[in-house]
Image: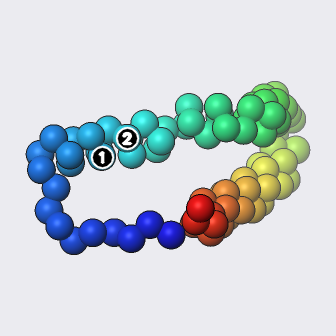
Amino acid sequence: MERISNDPLSVDEAKARLRTLAEQAGPATWIRDHPWDALALAFTAGLLAGAEPAARRPLAEALAQVLARGIVSSATQTTHKDPQ
């Protein structure tokens, strides 16, 4: 695991670090890393949008559960990577 230094960064170093983190924070990075999951999510969202009003709530709840599990799984994989 990387050790976080308490040494202050220069302005240029801080800007470079912020740019790197900002690039990784957007949805484009996740979509690029998980294209099939993104496709499945878009397809499911389309089905949900076009569903009968009575069917929307159970579909939305099921989708929310799947997304919550995926977010937890993704966060777990990100925080528990083995150092090399």
As drawn, is 84 to the left or to the right of 54? left
As drawn, is 76 to the left or to the right of 6? right
Percent position (x, y) of residue 20? 37, 41
Mark 2 lies on residue: 20
Q: Secondary structure at mark 1?
A: helix
Q: Secondary structure at mark 2?
A: helix
- Residue 44 visible? The answer is yes
57 or 77, nearer to the observer: 77
Position of 31 relative to 64 (above/below): above
Q: What's the colour scheme?
A: rainbow
User: Tags 2 and 1 in contact by the CB under 8 Å rule?
Assistant: yes
Percent position (x, y) of residue 39? 78, 30
Percent position (x, y) of residue 77? 67, 62
Position of 38 relative to 21 (above/below): above
- Residue 68 visible? The answer is no
Residue found farthest to the front: 84
- Residue at the (16%, 55%) spot, across then down: 9
Q: Please, what is the three-letter code of the amino acid marked with disc 2?
A: Thr
Percent position (x, y) of residue 42? 75, 31
How many dots with numbers?
2
Q: Quadrant of the C terminus?
A: bottom right
